[in-house]
Amino acid sequence: MSFSDPWVVLVLCIAGTFVWRALGVAVASRIDISGALFQWFNCVAYAMLAGLITRVILIPSGTLAQTPDVDRITAMGIGLCVFFMARRNIFAGTGTAFLVFLCLTTARQFGIL
Amino acid sequence: MSPLGQSTALRLGIRDGLLMPFWMVFGSMIGFGSMARDAGFGLGVALGSSVGIWGLPGQVAMVELYAVGLPIFAIVVASSMANMRFMPMCVVLIPHFRGNSTAMRWRYLLAQMLSINIWTVFMRHGPGLAPEDRLPFYLGVSVTCLIGGVLGTTIGYVASGILPLYVTVSLVFLNPAYFVFVFSSVRYRNCIIAVILGALTGPLLYQVSPDWSVPATGVIAGTVAYYFDKWLEART
């Protein structure tokens, strides 16, 4: 088993993510849930996730990077319209965004767009 | 709130898990499975990564950087950094299990099972449940999502090259799209402010530093949101 064996990389990467989980648990056991610090962590968690998600949609890496920006933005725009028209229905918003995106990528695949 | 009982809470968790998160994880892991295969990984490592790392940005970093032949230390650091969000997520999650000694004894395992899909479902419904119902609810959601992750990774791996790109890429798009609507539905004012500021800051900071953008967004946008909310509270 060499040092760059995929299994070695995997185990180290699992540990690399677990460090953050464990650190979070350690802080959690000392925190006052009604206190200011907990509220701050709550804001940090939401801001972090929201930032990550918009980044993934606007500046993706991996598979999504192969799609044009305009497709992802159009799908999200129409999805958000439906979401608010359907009184903030997550299912309606997600379904619409997915279908619009699927139609756009399929159309591109077959040279329609 | 009167307790629902363990089996009812577990069923509720499975139901909430199957409603959306299962399919989201399933879709994005199909993308990951085919990506892992393209990078030259075996199915075992791909599955181990889905279940063990259990956080897509860290998994993607591992696979992408291994494929370009980076040194192992650089791969591990990048993968770990990509999953830093688990720290504040666990800080916010774990205190909800206080009052349940079993859950607290196993808290590191519960943290290991956490993913962003599970976190958002739990943060919506978990805190409203009686303390003794939260553990079975959490287990219902998380095991459902883990099964979705294993199935998705396997199918993506096996069907890599069979599934056309426009299908795979749409499945990968599904989860981030879903989160936009989940985060557009947060109810507390401080969370709403944090989400808006984070969404604006995230892509901008990514242009400055891809590696540090996620934690930096959290700390900067989160801190501003926290104080802005306090300021609004003081005014009313």
Image (cartoon, coloured by chain):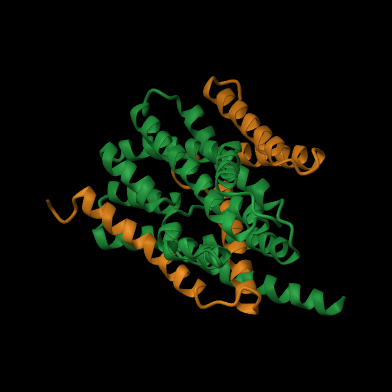
Chain colours: A orange, B green
**Front-most of residues B125 and B77:** B125
Percent x, y of residue B184: 71, 51
Percent x, y of residue B216: 53, 69
Which quadrant of the figure contains the N terminus of chain B?
A: bottom right
Q: Quadrant of residue B76?
A: bottom left
Give me the residue at 12% from left, 51% from top.
A1
Percent x, y of residue B188: 74, 62
**Front-most of residues A3 and B147:** B147
Give me the residue at 45% from left, 60% from top.
B111
Image position of B57 with respect to A94: above or below: below
**Front-most of residues B227 and A74:** B227
Image position of B215 with respect to B139: above or below: below
Give me the residue at 13% from left, 53% from top.
A2
Residue A5 lies left or right of residue B13; in this view the side is left
Percent x, y of residue B133: 59, 54
Which quadrant of the figure contains the C terminus of chain B?
A: bottom right
